[in-house]
Image (cartoon, rainbow, N blue to C red):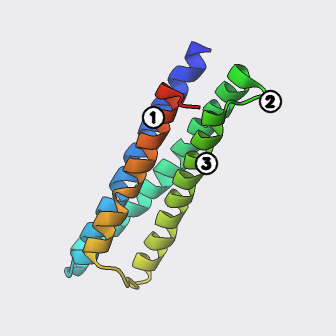
Amino acid sequence: MLWIKSLHIFFVIAWMAGVFYLPRIFVNLAMETNTAVTERLLLMARKLYRFSMWIAVPAIVFGAILLYMLYGAHMPGFMHAKLLFVVLIVGYHHACGRILKKFEKGVNTRSHKWFRVFNEVPVFLLLAIIILVVVKPF
């Protein structure tokens, strides 16, 4: 079980690195006026999005295996809350994909300030997950 837990933690960290950095690229894209720089940022964003999507798969798979090994069908309440936050992070990541497609089409209706706030959302979701897993409040 420790191998599964180690792999889960590793892939979650790698996935979250992508989830944290991709919206930061959006901040720069929203401010950029130079076409060459915009193209470079779009290339970086596409590669990071693809990479982090593939990294999310083993993170979720190893997490599901751990969930089954630890609790079977009888999860404690904090795990239901944790899974809700995981679903929200997955949704956030997919929203990043939709935003990236808009940038690729040259359509952006958001300011760099909006993207700066948007960039903080996964930080709070991950914090909630960590607190739930470590503290196990219910």
**Residue 118 visible in the picture:** yes
Identify the residue position indicated by label 2 in the image. Answer: 73
Task: Identify which residue is drawn at 22% across, 76% down.
Answer: 31
Nearest the camera: 108 or 39?
A: 108
Q: In 3D space, how far apart are the residues under numbered discs 2 and 3 (Cα atoms)?
A: 16 Å
Task: Identify which residue is drawn at 65% across, 35% down.
Answer: 77
**Residue 40 visible in the picture:** no
In the displayed structure, would residue 138 be above or below residue 4?
Answer: below
Which residue, as the protein is rendered here, is positioned at the far front? 138
**Badge 1 or badge 2: first in the primary sequence:** 2
Query: Whole-percent x and y of residue 130?
Result: 45, 34
Q: Which mark is residue 84?
A: 3
**The C terminus - image quarter:** top right
Q: Secondary structure at mark 3?
A: helix
Query: Whole-percent x and y of residue 136?
Result: 54, 28
Q: Secondary structure at mark 2?
A: loop
- Residue 82 picture quarter: top right
Give the residue type at disc 2.
Answer: Ala
59 relative to 103 in the view: left or right: right
In the displayed structure, would residue 119 be above or below residue 1?
Answer: below
Q: In 3D space, how far apart are the residues under numbered discs 1 and 3 (Cα atoms)?
A: 13 Å
Identify the residue position indicated by label 1 in the image. Answer: 130
Q: Secondary structure at mark 1?
A: helix
Give the residue type at disc 1.
Answer: Ile
92 relative to 23 in the view: left or right: right
Nearest the camera: 92 or 124?
A: 124
31 relative to 13 in the view: left or right: left
Q: Which mark is residue 54?
A: none
Task: Identify which residue is drawn at 42% across, 36% down.
Answer: 13
Query: Whole-percent x and y of residue 1?
Result: 62, 15
Give the residue type at disc 3.
Answer: Leu
